[in-house]
Image (tube, rainbow, N blue to C red):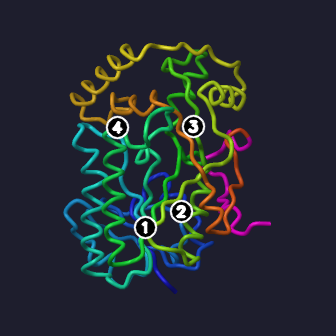
Amino acid sequence: MKSVLFTGATGFLGRRFLRGAHALPWHIRALTRREPPKTTETPDAQVTWFRGCLESGDGLQEALHGVDAVIHAAGGGRVRRPDDYDRNNARTTETLLRVVRECAPDLERFILVSSMAARGPIKEGYAPGPISLYGQSKARAELLTLEAGNSFPVTILRPPAIYGPGDNRLDPLIKAVQRGRVMAPSSHVRTSWVHVDDCIAALYTMLEHEHLSGQVFELEDGAPLSLADLVNILAHGNSVAPPKITRLPSPLLISVAWLIEMGARVTGKQALLTRDKLKDAVNGHWLQDRTLMEKTFPWVPRFQFSESYPWGVDAPFEAGETKKQ
């Protein structure tokens, strides 16, 4: 049986990926920087945990020895200081690629799970490109990955906003909806979404089907949402009346974000709202195009936000369609 190393195994996407390990004819090596979870819903025979550090490279040689593929999903946008964006995303990718070259030069596939922030928003009159520090760090990770394509096959997946069972990132918005009042930027933008199981199905099919190196794929569920659409879905799913949406000017939101950042520095916690995130939130639409994905692979999305919410943490795993009907 072939093996794939999955970084970011304890994150939202990683936990769900491991939960569906039984659906994949690969042995999964799950990488964690801390002690492996004591309790897990993953089939033990299908998953082996490795402890390693993507910053220093410690432990990566053992995890990568003899591996056939890598899915690099570690990284993120919750930080304590601006430099953390590059450290979490670009520098860790650079370290992982270096060790892969040293320990797994015959790798069959390296898949980077990036972000649509690396491409930037769609805004009339502006060329595509990352506008936030987070997006710029993801773009640098993509560039490093594409450069590594001279050594082994590489693929970049740019999912949009991911939703589904086990995700708590919408909890602050859900609570605001339940209270009946939502604060939002004055700009009106639309965003693409994809269900976590459809995203995992995309990763599965990338492992199983040969494709050209150096390609960048986008995902979306076919139903982009405005903030008003989103809060109405959340209200309906929570059996409450649609909330009042108060639009706030950008200067005020920037001041609020600055205060939250300062508070995070004092407490040592990660800031849920930052000035950098606001750059992405107010500058253009975040729309994806899945055309290349569907042309290249037997993949179609099975879920849409409005039809699948509310979801439960213990909802059964659904890998999605891997064959077009």
Residue carrying label 1: 6
Looking at the picture, does residue 260 appear above or below residue 300?
A: above
Residue carrying label 2: 17
Q: Are there few (<14), some (14-19), or many (20+) residues within 10 Å of tag 4?
A: many
- Which of the two labelled residues, at mark 2 and mark 1, occupies the earlier sequence position? 1
Residue carrying label 4: 132
Mark sitting on residue 191: 3
Q: Are there few (<14), some (14-19), or many (20+) residues within 10 Å of tag 2?
A: many
Q: Secondary structure at mark 2?
A: helix
Find the magenta span and give its range.
307-325
In the rendered image, residue 130, in percent from the top left (x then y), is placed at 38, 42
Q: Are marks 2 and 1 in contact (CB under 8 Å)?
A: yes
* Foreground: disc 1 or disc 3: 3
In the rendered image, residue 297, in percent from the top left (x then y), is placed at 63, 68
Q: Are marks 3 and 4 in contact (CB under 8 Å)?
A: no
Q: Are marks 2 and 4 in contact (CB under 8 Å)?
A: no
In the rendered image, residue 216, in percent from the top left (x then y), is placed at 48, 60
Quarter where residue 181 is shown: top right
Q: Distance of mark 1 from mark 3, alpha carbons?
A: 27 Å
Instruction: Tell me the quarter of the image containing the C terminus.
Output: bottom right
Amino acid type at image mark 2:
Phe
Q: Are marks 2 and 3 in contact (CB under 8 Å)?
A: no
* Foreground: disc 2 or disc 4: 4
- Which of the two labelled residues, at mark 1 and mark 3, occupies the earlier sequence position? 1
- The residue at the point 44 percent across, 35 percent down is 126
- The residue at the point 37 percent across, 44 percent down is 135
